[in-house]
Image (cartoon, helix red, strand yellow):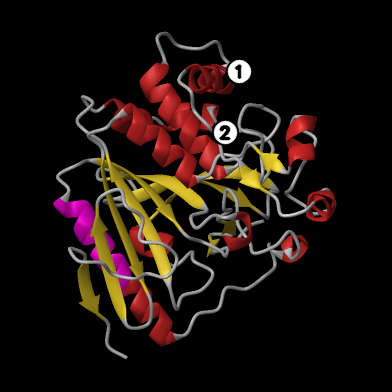
Amino acid sequence: MARRLRAGGAVLALGLGGSAWAGLPTFCERASEITAADQDRVLRFAGVVRRELEASRSRVALVARAGTDLSRFGLLYSHAGIALKHNPASPWAVRQLYYACDEARPRLFDQGVAGFALGADTPARGHMSLVFLPDDDGVLEKTALDKPLGLSLLAGKYSANAYAFGTRYQNCNQWVAELLASAWGRAQAPAPGAERAQAQAWLRAQGYAAGPVKVPSHAMMFAGQFVPLLHMNDHPIEDIHALALQVSVPESIEAFVQRRLPAARRVELCHDKERIVVRRGWEPIGAGCEAKPGDEVIALGS
């Protein structure tokens, strides 16, 4: 399950995306079309996101977007990354894992806020989440900016539904989870080649819960075995039988961060064709993008 956005021959791969298992075989060739009106709306939305990042007085933020329709899996958000105020690529560019179709392998990619927002499948609506962490003496920022470390956490093989506690594959959200583990739990430098295993061991010890991503039926679970970039051979057999896969998704990472750092602040933003809604706090807006008292509402012109 993946969604693509062309960027220098690369494809931004969602950690878990798509409205069904079907459709993935051609996702690398699928063009991303957007009208001028839709692009203008999303860019205005991205401008408000950028405003929140700048106003946060933080230097790093965990960011997530709703990329494709995951409602049949009970999920809204699909793709996470780390926004860095001092990213060498550009201020607040998002460092993330992407899948390079031309090379058939995962890579790291720094993408501006506007491009990140444009990664949604349906430009008529969109959701983004920002989590600002309390001051940690710059540990996460320093770790996220360490390109060699980020690359050492990158698996050789990509799987959209990668098992969160295995090193055979990886999805984009799992890379973020392992980066957090490397920042917060590394007592000593891991042996070369053991970076991912050590990060996952720390996540387990800290009670990190990935997913579970609930697959609607055994038929869909079986069909997934024949879809490129989906794999079942890394998952425990009991999870497959239970139709509940331990896969890192943005909600899993945010829940872990909130539990570990209760002072973390969350801002969620969504838009439809008529307005942008900004909510500060951990209560989710939901897929409908409905404002509640206390939310900021910004009108969008037609």
Q: CA distance from mark 2 to mark 1?
A: 10 Å
Residue 299 horizontal side relative to residue 289, left or right:
left
Residue interval drawn in magenta: 44-55
- Residue 155 locus on image (x, y percent): 62, 33
Q: Quadrant of the N terminus?
A: bottom right
Q: Residues within 10 Å of mark 1 (few under 14, many from 20)?
A: few
Q: Residues within 10 Å of mark 2 (few under 14, many from 20)?
A: many
Residue 255 horizontal side relative to residue 58, left or right:
right
Residue plotted at (55% across, 10% down)? 191
Q: Which residue is mark 2?
A: 154
Residue plotted at (22% across, 40% down)? 59
Q: Quadrant of residue 166?
A: top right
Amino acid type at image mark 1: Gly
Q: Main secondary structure of the magenta part?
A: helix
- Residue 24 locus on image (x, y percent): 73, 61
Q: Quadrant of residue 237?
A: top right
Residue 232 vertical placement versus 41 (above, below): above
Please, what secondary structure does the residue beneath circle 2 have? Answer: loop
Please, what secondary structure does the residue beneath circle 1 have? Answer: loop
Q: Which residue is mark 1?
A: 193
Q: How many marks?
A: 2
Residue plotted at (26% across, 51% down)? 91
Residue 235 horizontal side relative to residue 203, left or right:
right
Residue 22 vertical placement versus 144 (above, below): below
